[in-house]
Amino acid sequence: MKKILAITGIRSDYDLMSNLFKKINSDDYFELNLLVCGAHLSQTYGNTVKLIEKDGFKILIKIESLIDSDSKSSRLKTTSIILQNSIDIVNQYNPDLIIYAGDREEVLIGSMLGTFLKIPTAHFFGGDFTANGLVDNQIRNAASKMSSIHFVSTEEHKKRLVSIGEPEYRIFQIGSPALDKFKIEPIKDMSIIYKNLNIQPFDSYALVIYHPLGKNDDITFKNILKSIKEKKLKAFVSYPNTDAGNKDIINIINEYKDDTDFYFYRNLDRNTFINIYRNASFQIGNSSAGIVESASVGIPVINIGVRQQGRTINENVILVEDNFNDIKNSIDIVLDKNFIDKCKTIKNIYGDANSSEKAFKLLKNLNYKDFLLKLEDPTQLEVI
């Protein structure tokens, strides 16, 4: 039996990986435990540890780590709390593999634990890139350099890892596991969802997911809501993530909380969210879901501002500035019948919704210890 420890700190990374977790957990070859921390244990962000418990996964440790102060230093302080409180327990558990996903602080924790405790590690979603100046690239690349194995979404991501000195034999291109949920989650009629949420049905609606950049977030977010109202539309609107600036967005939500044109949510169960996503007229904001996932459900996306700048996009995504007029005019574009029809036929460049199965088979067949020592000299590697 192989012991796997998975680290998750926020709803977004858990949703990306949960289908793979289920496959691992259902096979007697593996023992899966989770290290749960960060926003999962915060009431502000929906206390999403309950979803993990509902899914039936064993939790090795819960670390209440989130410094909810909305400052530049809060993420660093949160990281230090996770590290300090996980070292001894992970060392005693001594897993055969540690896995983690993305570009948030938890990937630094997982990669450092593996490096210093001499435990093989697997990083999902390495090799991605954004040209927005945020810390995501540095965090992602630092974790990749300390990781033993890489599961990447695209050939471009593989090339980027090779360019920073990771040999090809460590890199496995599987597509994005984020897409698998659209294939496996049952379809539910929206009338049931409206009834469960206790709201009046929307004739049609946008899905708003906007995360902070730390500057003018309140203005941009209000411009999104104003544009939707001016177009006489409705919307499901997500609360922001934990990045600095989130309180400015939450303050705007509080201004609009009684507006029946909007349904604001901190947390939705997976099936409810997926069916809301499937039936949206379009997605608007700056979430990576619009870049990676939306083409799998064939809806248009308005991506606002610089947060996703530099990433490879599908043809259903239009890029706009964060001012009111550009946002308002972009809604006309995504509601055009020809554009809507085009979006329904796009093949997603990020994968085929079978990535979790590919990763599962690799995890079952790889000898993790073969990847532990990083003896290769980057100057001797051929860049592809």
Image: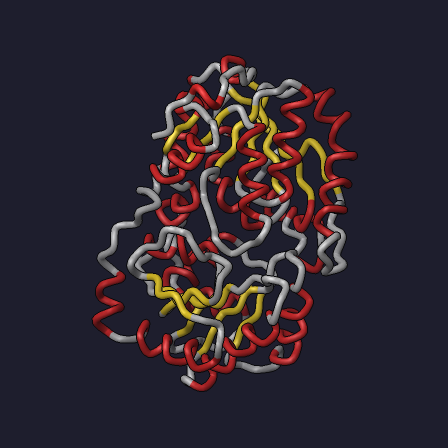
| Above or below: residue 220 compared with residue 87 | below
Residue 316 screen position, x and y as percent: 31, 61
In front of the other: 293 or 105: 105
- Total labels: the figure holds 0
Horizontal and vertical percent position of residue 210: 53, 64
On the image, which quarter does residue 93 sit in?
A: top right
The answer to whether 94 is drawn above or below residue 16 in the figure is above
Question: Of 373 and 172, which appears nearest the observer?
Answer: 373
Q: Is residue 131 left or right of residue 33?
A: left
Left or right: where does residue 320 sit relative to residue 146?
left
Residue at the outermost front position: 379
Q: Does residue 91 lie above or below 123 as drawn? A: above
Which quarter of the rendering shows the N terminus? top right
Q: In the depicted view, which residue is nearer to us: 304 or 360?
A: 304
Colour mapping: secondary structure
Residue 147 location, x and y as percent? 55, 28
Query: Residue placed at 30% from the left, 59% from the top?
Result: 298
Q: Quadrant of residue 45?
A: bottom right
Measured as percent of width and height from the top left, residue 230 is found at 45, 86
Q: Is the C terminus in the top left, top right, bottom left or bottom right quadrant?
A: top left
> Who's the residue at 49% across and 69% down the image?
236
